[in-house]
């Protein structure tokens, strides 16, 4: 493309509104322009890079046997009301009304839509498993849209959803997609870690985030310096000093328990009133799950439950409520056996249905009315805390180090949260109706682009890796008034294009300084400068990243370009 007529509005000054390098450079080099807070135009260079990232994502998703579809952004409120997320998504969900005053949401994510689609179009186990995906704009009214593409209100996401007969099949697909994600971020040249994460408002059990290591990341990752262990510290607390309750000393009443399903049922069977102060959290210690139900009328301030570690946290309360558990009192505490098939599904008040039986290592039993001060020493729990740098890694290998991360991808085992809510069933082998087990998998495509810039830039501009660069070669004619330079530059432009090389051709009538600045800023991997030695058939060949440059005869030019 001839730069003289491509829309690349580079800026001379650093944009005042941008603090982060990726935000600054993408604006300054004319890749993006803001339309409204957290809403961006992608200009030709930005669009080209975005497409390259999209294509890597698409290739790897296709390779993982996922099928590309496209779902609408405009979504009827009823779907969201059925799953309860019309309420629980709160202000982040963008809402609007049509001319008939019917409520709609702009897709923040597509579990509801995809589940309804599959419910209506598939009905037999014979089709299972399968994965559907799309690459599409998502809308979230973020409280603080910031950092340019890193936290937008309209942004590009690849979202995928898998449907299964059982958890075994979900586990298989989860692994396949997990590996596809690794390949995607490797192909993007990113330095990243897959970390154990929290299931947030999505519901579900196993979940991992893909974090690009970057000082500007909003998350903190705890990782082992010797093994693959890595967790988002916010959400993967580890029990460092858990002491099992001495059951013989507990003056507890054993009660027969039904399957605990909702917070209300938990409350009912514990004999509590379900009030605002009641929260529950389950965590895993060794192979045992523990549920703690808290009540507002106990105050045990030094017990920092938030600081319990270990990946598998199953919340019975909302995320915020669970976080509030810090400092709240215990209403009941006891080890719970949770069968492997534990199904976590939400209802409105609780978020998760725990299809588990509570008991002291016995199915169907649960200790009732545990009183922390009476029944065990609170102090045993008081030193539970966030994992810290220098701690031994929970997997026994190496020592914990911290890093900041940008969440570029997230994979979840959802279970039947959405298929239950939307009554999405299929006929299983026995001819019986059964709800699908689901997985869901997201990648922030536009955020990934910004994360790449965070890792690939220098003081003068961006340093695009070849596979992502908007163009492969930047051909710069330093003086458009010299006939022999124009001739040679035009000739090279044609030759390179014929060789299948993507070329941005700076044919503008601008000073050399401006051209070099812009070229550095845009960061195309190879620069070919047609200057004073044009008459001899020599051009200056420069690697943008290393800064190495040499004079190359035009006959040898193509072989320099890899
Ligand atoms: P975050 O914790 O940063 O708010 P999230 O956990 O809410 O992200 P998910 O629901 O997991 O996001 O969505 C899948 C992916 O979409 C994320 O991993 C991230 O890469 C991307 N993403 C989420 N929110 C935004 C946003 N506001 N702007 C750009 N990308 C986003
Ligand atoms: Mg978010
Ligand atoms: Mg997150
Ligand atoms: Mg996430």
Image: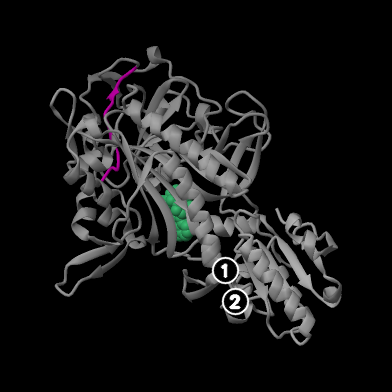
Secondary structure mainly formed by the magenta segment? loop
Q: Is residue 137 above or below residue 391?
A: below
Q: Which residues are magenta?
A: 349-360
Residue 8 marker: 2
> Considering the numbered disc 1 on the image, is that residue within a helix, a strand or a loop?
helix
Q: Tell me if mark 1 has few (under 14), some (14-19) or many (20+) residues whose alpha carbon lies within 10 angstroms of its own.
A: many
- The CA distance from mark 2 to mark 1 is 7 Å
Q: Nearer the viewer, residue 471 or 359?
A: 471
> Which residue is labeled 1 in the image?
45
Q: Are marks 2 and 1 in contact (CB under 8 Å)?
A: yes
Residue 354 lies in the magenta stretch: yes
State which quadrant residue 459 falls in: bottom right
Residue 514 marker: none
The residue drawn where x is 68% and y is 82% is 508
Q: Tell me if mark 2 has few (under 14), some (14-19) or many (20+) residues whose alpha carbon lies within 10 angstroms of its own.
A: some
Residue 250 lies in the magenta stretch: no
């Amino acid at each position: 493309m001839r730069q003289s007529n491509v829309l690349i509005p580079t800026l001379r000054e650093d944009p005042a509104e941008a603090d982060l390098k990726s935000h600054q450079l993408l604006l300054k080099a004319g890749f993006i322009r803001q339309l409204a807070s957290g809403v961006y135009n992608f200009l030709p260079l930005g669009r080209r890079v975005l497409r390259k990232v999209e294509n890597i994502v698409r290739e790897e998703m296709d390779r993982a046997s996922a099928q590309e579809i496209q779902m609408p952004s405009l979504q009827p409120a009823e779907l969201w009301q059925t799953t309860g997320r019309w309420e629980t998504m709160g202000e982040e969900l963008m809402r609007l009304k049509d001319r008939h005053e019917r409520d709609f949401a702009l897709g923040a994510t597509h579990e509801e839509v995809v589940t309804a689609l599959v419910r209506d179009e598939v009905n037999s186990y014979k089709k299972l498993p399968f994965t559907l995906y799309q690459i599409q704009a998502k809308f979230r009214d973020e409280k603080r849209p910031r950092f340019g593409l890193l936290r937008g209100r309209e942004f590009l996401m690849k979202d995928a959803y898998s449907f299964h007969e059982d958890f075994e099949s979900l586990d298989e697909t989860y692994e396949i997609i997990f590996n596809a994600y690794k390949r995607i971020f490797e192909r993007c040249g990113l330095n990243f870690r897959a970390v154990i994460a929290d299931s947030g408002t999505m519901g579900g059990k196993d979940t991992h985030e893909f974090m690009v290591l970057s000082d500007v990341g909003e998350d903190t990752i705890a990782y082992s310096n010797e093994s693959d262990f890595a967790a988002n510290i916010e959400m993967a607390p580890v029990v460092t000093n858990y002491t099992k309750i001495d059951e013989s000393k507990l003056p507890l009443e054993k009660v027969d328990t039904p399957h605990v399903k909702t917070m209300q049922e938990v409350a009912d069977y514990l004999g509590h009133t379900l009030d605002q102060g009641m929260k529950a959290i389950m965590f895993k210690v060794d192979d045992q799950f523990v549920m703690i139900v808290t009540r507002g009328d106990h105050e045990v301030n030094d017990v920092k439950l938030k600081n319990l570690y270990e990946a598998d946290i199953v919340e019975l309360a909302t995320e915020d409520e669970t976080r509030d558990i810090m400092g709240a009192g215990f209403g009941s505490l006891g080890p719970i056996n949770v069968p492997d098939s534990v199904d976590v599904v939400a209802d409105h008040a609780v978020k998760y249905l725990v299809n588990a039986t509570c008991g002291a290592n016995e199915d169907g039993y649960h200790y009732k009315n545990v009183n922390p001060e009476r029944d065990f020493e609170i102090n045993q729990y008081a030193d539970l805390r966030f994992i810290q740098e220098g701690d031994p890694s929970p997997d026994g290998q190496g020592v914990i180090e911290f890093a900041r991360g940008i969440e570029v991808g997230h994979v979840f085992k959802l279970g039947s949260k959405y298929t239950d809510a939307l009554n999405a069933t299929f006929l299983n082998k026995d001819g019986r109706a059964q709800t699908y087990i689901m997985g869901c998998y997201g990648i922030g495509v536009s955020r990934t682009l910004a994360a790449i810039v965070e890792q690939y830039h220098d003081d003068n501009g961006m340093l695009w890796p070849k596979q992502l660069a908007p163009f492969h070669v930047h051909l710069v004619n330093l003086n458009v008034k010299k006939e022999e330079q124009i001739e040679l530059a035009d000739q090279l432009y044609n030759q390179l294009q014929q060789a299948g090389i993507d070329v941005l051709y700076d044919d503008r009538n601008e000073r050399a300084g401006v051209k070099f600045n812009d070229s550095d800023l845009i960061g195309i991997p190879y620069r070919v400068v047609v200057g004073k030695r044009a008459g001899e058939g020599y051009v200056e060949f420069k690697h943008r990243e290393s800064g190495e440059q040499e004079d190359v005869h035009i006959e040898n030019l193509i072989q320099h370009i890899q």
